[in-house]
Amino acid sequence: MDKIITIGGKPLKGKVKVSGAKNAVLPIMAAALLVDGVTNVKRVPNLRDTRTMARLLEIVGAKVRFEDNEMMIDARPVNNPVAPYELVKTMRASFYVLGPLLSRFGMAKVSMPGGCAWGPRPVDFHLKGLEKLGAEVTLEGGYIIARAKRLIGNRIRFDIPSVGATGNIVMAAVTARGTTVIENAAREPEIVQLCRLLNKMGGEIHGIGTDELTIEGVDELKPHSVEVIPDRIEAGTFLIAGAALGEICVCGVEPEHLNAVIEKIEETGAKITVSKDTITVKPAKKVLPVDVTTAVYPGFPTDLQAQWTALMSIADGSSIVTDTIYHDRFSHVPELNRLGANIKVENNVAFVRGQKELIGAPVMSTDIRASASLIIGGLLAKGRTDISRVYHIDRGYENIEEKFRALGAEIWREAE
Ligand code: UD1
């Protein structure tokens, strides 16, 4: 296992180019299973999660070539609609193959995802949605087995907007018989990109980007190539780091996807300049404390909550960080406190008392975004921080230490 080491307290400066969005490419890769042909995907980040999804596509029978951030998925030979526990347990997003496999084969067997570092994370919306479309869904030996000769359109309402359930149901409904309406659908840019791709493949999805999607089922889809949107969470991570550590230009981004984050960074006193596809952050002398409450898109993303908490740990005053999406997503807090942060968590709220300085220490990363927050914490802290279990970060960030090093950070990787 590798660890990442930082020597903090150094100012950062420079340009960083963001990679393709992990959370956009994973459903796109699953959508490739819907067509009897070859899908080309450009700007695919080389991550543990994209490689895991590629492996899963191969297990169901697809041929996958992945080179230089380009992926070719040949779904013609797909013949085994089974997603095994060994893979699903390492990446919950594997569950995305349920809708496409069911729609293409009339049957799918996908391991039920287990718990997660941030709490229970149920999949009930996915399953209820498929049942509404006429699927028979059972649980056998830890596997969800869904069956339906052909799905039939229906009206589905999610209690709360779910990214994964929206993606899964859209992929199932796109070739169902008749009309499906999803009320309270997710509006995240990653779901928008998925729906647009499905339409290019011949689907008929209306209301894209709103909370009500209407899907007129079509008989067949054909392959279409796609370039993955920029990763707004990676971009946000660098911007949050820059708000304390130095002038950083984040390029190759879609600034509109980051409006809520930009607003909050500006409230810290940092200056933000936006052009067509770049965002530059220039920190103020002091980081002002700013409260954040996570929300579904276009609100402040839960995937940047941990990084924001790290920034607030050195703010000039106290702030409150509330996560309304994942109530238990605070495993980074005890680790940031090891660096000298003063954060108390009650239920889904972190009370952060900004400190004059953090001091390096050994810490342990527990999930993708917690790891990113510890890197920011380490870069803010005086002296050496050893962040262990960095395989989490490799799931979701492409070359993160190289990118920070190019900005002047003292950061490297070592085998533990
Ligand atoms: C996706 C993202 C993840 C992000 C999250 C919220 C991917 C691969 N992952 O996860 O990085 O943090 O969105 O933006 O895109 N819920 C249920 N039942 C369900 C499904 C969800 O109760 O069947 C709840 C969840 O517990 C959570 C909320 O709905 O409280 C939102 O979760 P959801 O949007 O589904 O997250 P994911 O798609 O798993």
Image: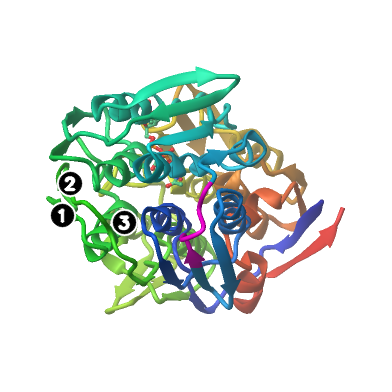
- Choose between 334 and 39: the one closer to the eye: 39
- Residue 64 at x, y = what percent? 56, 65
Q: Quadrant of ligand 1?
A: top left
- Residue 151 at x, y = what percent? 26, 35
Q: Quadrant of residue 320?
A: top left
Question: In the shown orientation, is residue 31 left or right of residue 66?
Answer: left
Q: Is residue 280 above or below residue 215?
A: below
- Residue 133 at x, y = what percent? 24, 30
In the picture of the structure, the residue carrying the numbered disc 2 is 217
- Disc 3 marks which amino acid? Leu
**Element assignment for label 3:** helix
Q: Quadrant of residue 80?
A: top right
- Residue 255 at x, y = what percent? 30, 68
Q: Is residue 384 visible?
A: no
**Element assignment for label 2:** loop
Q: Is residue 230 above or below residue 364?
A: below
Closer to the camera: disc 1 or disc 3? 1
- Choose between 157 and 377: the one closer to the eye: 157
Check if mark 1's residue and mark 2's residue have beta carbons within 8 Å. Answer: yes
Q: Is residue 340 above or below residue 132?
A: below
Label 1 vs 3, first from the N-terminus: 3
Check if mark 1's residue and mark 3's residue have beta carbons within 8 Å. Answer: no
CA distance separating discs 1 and 3: 12 Å
In the picture of the structure, the residue carrying the numbered disc 1 is 204
**Element assignment for label 1:** strand
* Magenta span: chief secondary structure: loop
In the picture of the structure, the residue carrying the numbered disc 3 is 194
